[in-house]
Image: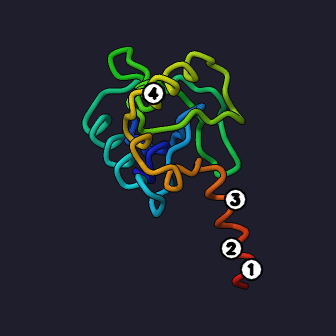
Amino acid sequence: MADGDTVTLNAEGTIHKIRLSEIDTPERNQPYGLTTRAVLSSLLLGKQVEVKIVKNSDRYGRVIGRIFIDEEDVSAYMIEMGHAMVYRRYIMDDSLLKLEKSAKKNNLGLWKLAEEDRVPPWVWRKQKRKKDLRAK
């Protein structure tokens, strides 16, 4: 498990890196990052899953897809329980926005964090890149 939105699956001896479509989770060293990684790991560990491929490869060589366990959409679950944010840049399923709104309203998962700790992962990564460039 790389983080809360990227998994490594073994299908008949072949390893596949899957990036969950339409969601983004805190990075490992970001507040709630280790929690979301643990949640995804506990959901998938030892389970038979179905992957619906959205895109064959991203710039990191990962397959972009929606993962299902017994027909339950893992991306939707992660949003609904407050473990992920809708990745607005890549959204195709507007129902995820309703799930996110509900999780936020009910103060679930990462939505319990103080506002300053709830930086969207895409913003956090951009800030980190700028900070890293200044440090060079």
Disc 1 target residue: 134
Tell me which residue sits at (50%, 45%) in the image.
25
Tell me if 56 is positioned left or right of 24 in this view: right
* Mark 1: secondary structure: helix
- Of tags 1 and 4, the one toward the viewer is 4
Three-letter amino acid code of the residue under disc 1: Arg
Disc 4 target residue: 105
3D distance between C-alphas at marks 4 and 3 = 27 Å
3D distance between C-alphas at marks 1 and 3 = 13 Å
Disc 2 target residue: 131
Dots 4, 3 in contact, CB < 8 A: no
Tell me which residue sits at (68%, 43%) in the image.
58
Query: Which residue occupies the foreground of this view, 67 or 115?
Result: 115
Sequence order check, earlier mark of 1 and 4 = 4
Query: Which residue occupies the foreground of this view, 6 or 63?
Result: 6
Query: Which residue occupies the foreground of this view, 108 or 22?
Result: 108
List the single residue furthest toward the bottom: 136
Residue 8 pos. (x, y %): 43, 45
3D distance between C-alphas at marks 2 and 4 = 32 Å
Disc 3 target residue: 126
Dots 1, 2 in contact, CB < 8 A: yes
Sequence order check, earlier mark of 4 and 3 = 4
Sequence order check, earlier mark of 1 and 3 = 3
Tell me which residue sits at (69%, 59%) in the image.
126
Residue 52 pos. (x, y %): 53, 22
- Of tags 4 and 3, the one toward the viewer is 4
Residue 24 pos. (x, y %): 55, 41
Tell me if 127 is positioned left or right of 33 in this view: right
Tell me which residue sits at (54%, 40%) in the image.
19
Dots 1, 3 in contact, CB < 8 A: no
Three-letter amino acid code of the residue under disc 3: Lys
Dot 1 surroundings within 10 Å: few (below 14), some, or many (20 or more)?
few
